[in-house]
Image (cartoon, rainbow, N blue to C red):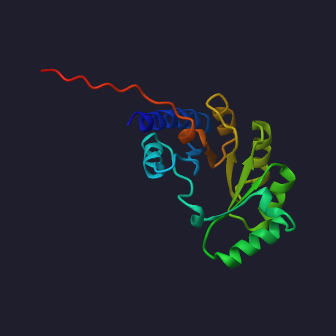
Amino acid sequence: MRHLSGVASLTARFVALAIEASQGRTRVLDTRKTTPGLRALERAAVRAGGGHNHRANLSDGVMIKDNHLAGISIVEAVHLARSRWPGRPVHVECDTLEQLAVIIESGADRAMLDNMDPGQVAAGIALVDGRIEVEVTGGVTLSTVASYAAARPDYISVGALTHSAGVIDIGLDLRS
């Protein structure tokens, strides 16, 4: 209970900052980085704090990361994902605006801007111009979430919601 209250409380802080900075546009997502055996409960705590859940498991969608692109292009990877897993969303991670331009043209559903600074994210949002969803990933903290949200991405994912949330001190006093 103490841990889950900490998850919900931390999520609520991130969500409030993101909503204010993005004028209600940006959603805060958890990640799959959860405590073994507590995933369902931690995901519920994120929702209780006003956040949203990312994929529940690996089969919910296809996520193409840089290490998946050894010997294959972004466009080829997206087309292969679509042919092997039709109907599943395809999200592609990038760390440069050049990669983002390719993702936009690839037919992916979402670009994941990984470890970019807020200025790069703003430039990426301008480049996307509403053509695909944009998610900010990697290293977002309470002190930086508003800067990222000000660029108005669709999503900001924060692993710390579950793996680094503190605990809330809860006491129970019985009186006779």
Q: Which residue is rendered at x = 65% and y = 28% of the image? A: 143
The answer to which of 94 and 22 lies nearer the viewer is 94
What's the residue at 57%, 32% (across, down)? 17
Is any part of residue 23 visible from this angle?
no
Residue 81 place in picture, x, y as percent = 71, 72
Is 84 located above or below residue 134 in the figure?
below
Q: Residue furthest left?
A: 176
The quarter of the picture where residue 146 lies is top right
124 sits left or right of 48 in the view: right
Where's residue 76, x and y in %? 81, 71
Which x, y percent locates residue 133?
67, 56
Residue 57 drawn at (x, y percent): 55, 60
> Would you identify the image quadrant in which residue 1 lies?
top left
Q: Nearer the viewer, residue 118 or 1?
A: 1
Q: Is residue 168 above or below residue 137?
A: above
- Quadrant holding the C terminus: top left
**Residue 124 position (above or below residue 55):** above
Residue 134 visible, this orientation: yes
* Residue shown at 69% from the left, 46% from the top: 136
